[in-house]
Each structure stands twice: as C-alpha cells, then as structure tokens.
Amino acid sequence: MTTIKAEIRKGKNENQYLRDNGMVPAVFYGPKQENTSIKISEKDFLKVYDEAGESSIITLNDGTEEHDVLIHDVQVHAVTGKTLHVDFYVIEKGKKVEVEVPIEFDGTSPAEKNLGGTLVKVMHVLPISAMPKNLPQEIIISVESLVDFDSQIKVSDIKLPEGVELNIEDEEAVVALIQAPKEEEEEPVEEFDPEAVQVEEKGKKEKTDEDEAGDKGEGKSE
C-alpha cells in the first residue's frame, strides 16, 4: 500500500508560508477520527495522487500513527495549478467504503471501426461500495458489444469485480453509445436554363435602348 508522510500542524495562519516552501496544508478525519491538521510535501503528495487517485486506499503516517485513508478532496489554484489544501478520509475498519471510480473503456467498437461511428461516453465514473481491500482503482468496460448505431452499454451490462457493488438504482441508465457520422449536406447545383439567359440578355438590351433614347431626348431639349 502506498504511504505518504505527514507532520501534525499546530501553528495557525501559516498556510501561505507552507505553500511557498513546497508544503501543503491538509487535514484527516473520519467517523471515529477527529479532525487533525497536518502538513505534507506537495511533491510527495502529487506522486501518490497520480498513482492512487481518489479511489485507492493509501497509508497516511502522521509521525506517531498510521491511518488507512482515501484522498477525499483536493483544492487546486485555478491559475497556477498549485495544490492549496487536501482532505484525507480515514477508513473505519470492517466497514464498506463508498467511492466513485473512473471508467476505462477498452478496445475499439465494431461500429467505430466498420461504420465510422463515434463513441459517446455518457458516464465517466461509477459510484460503488466495497471493503477497502476490494476497492478497484478503475472499472474497465469493453466496447466490443457496440456493433451498430442502435447498440448501447447500460448499467446492467457492467461486470464488477468480486466484492464490489454498484450504487446506481437505474439499471437501464446508459453508460456509452455510438453516434452515427454526420452526413455532409451538398449545395444544390442550379441547372443551366438557356431560355432564362436569353430573357435576361433581352431585358438588359431593352434597358440599354431606353437609356440611349433618354440621353438623346435630353440632348434635344437643350
């Protein structure tokens, strides 16, 4: 199990100082664990976060005790991307854990390969419950069943690992489907009409004759 080291944080109003020195203010808590303020290395945390995500159990060592925790919440600066604060949730031993795990779609569907369709991922995460030892880091779903534009993958089609339960009541909810390619609309081509051209040219000639007649009439009046 991945371990991250922490130090109990006793000082107040030191958050910015910690961030300026490569540390991140954090807290851990749980059903039987009081809120405890800590500080952790941003570099070490990002490495663990990249490997474990928010659905894997990690060990938090506060210097005196070790706690099995989930990364519950991460606050990130919108501009700089720096980690501002982290919440760790302490797992209660012997109890199931409810988390959302990411979906990993596996393969290329026949409808994409043969018909030029596009895979539409309706869901990106799945809410599950399991004992800590059974928690998967992701749920892998094959798209081989999507053979045409009417094919769909529904919640009821998902095969879960042993010991994992899905926390979705609607078994008909769509997880993924195939979108048909958009047909390009061709611009209508106007048919050549020689009679229309003749009428147009005749109209131009009559207009020209009228203009010339008008010019001559103006010349006589002078």
Image (cartoon, grey):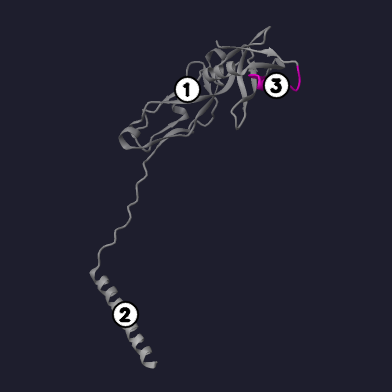
Please tell me which of labels 3 and 1 falls first in the chain. 3
The picture quadrant where one finds residue 56 is top right
Mark 3: give few (<14), some (14-19) or many (20+) Cα within 10 Å: few
- CA gap between label 1 and label 2 equals 79 Å
The location of residue 50, given as percent across then percent down, is: 53, 20
Look at the image and say whether residue 10 sits in the magenta stretch: no
Q: Which residue: 25% across, 67% down?
A: 193
The location of residue 99, given as percent across then percent down, is: 57, 22
Type of amino acid under label 3: Tyr
The picture quadrant where one finds residue 77 is top right
Please state, as top left, top right, bottom left or bottom right, where the C terminus lies in the image.
Answer: bottom left
Type of amino acid under label 2: Thr
Q: Secondary structure at mark 3?
A: helix
Please tell me which of labels 2 and 3 falls first in the chain. 3
Please tell me which of labels 1 and 2 falls first in the chain. 1
Q: Which residues are magenta?
A: 11-25
Q: Is residue 149 left or right of residue 37?
A: left
**Viewer-proximal residue among 165 and 67:** 67
Q: Is residue 171 left or right of residue 42?
A: left
Mark 2: give few (<14), some (14-19) or many (20+) Cα within 10 Å: few
Look at the image and say whether residue 23 sits in the magenta stretch: yes
Circle 3 sits on which residue?
Answer: 17
Circle 2 sits on which residue?
Answer: 208
The location of residue 71, given as percent across then percent down, is: 60, 20
Circle 1 sits on which residue?
Answer: 139
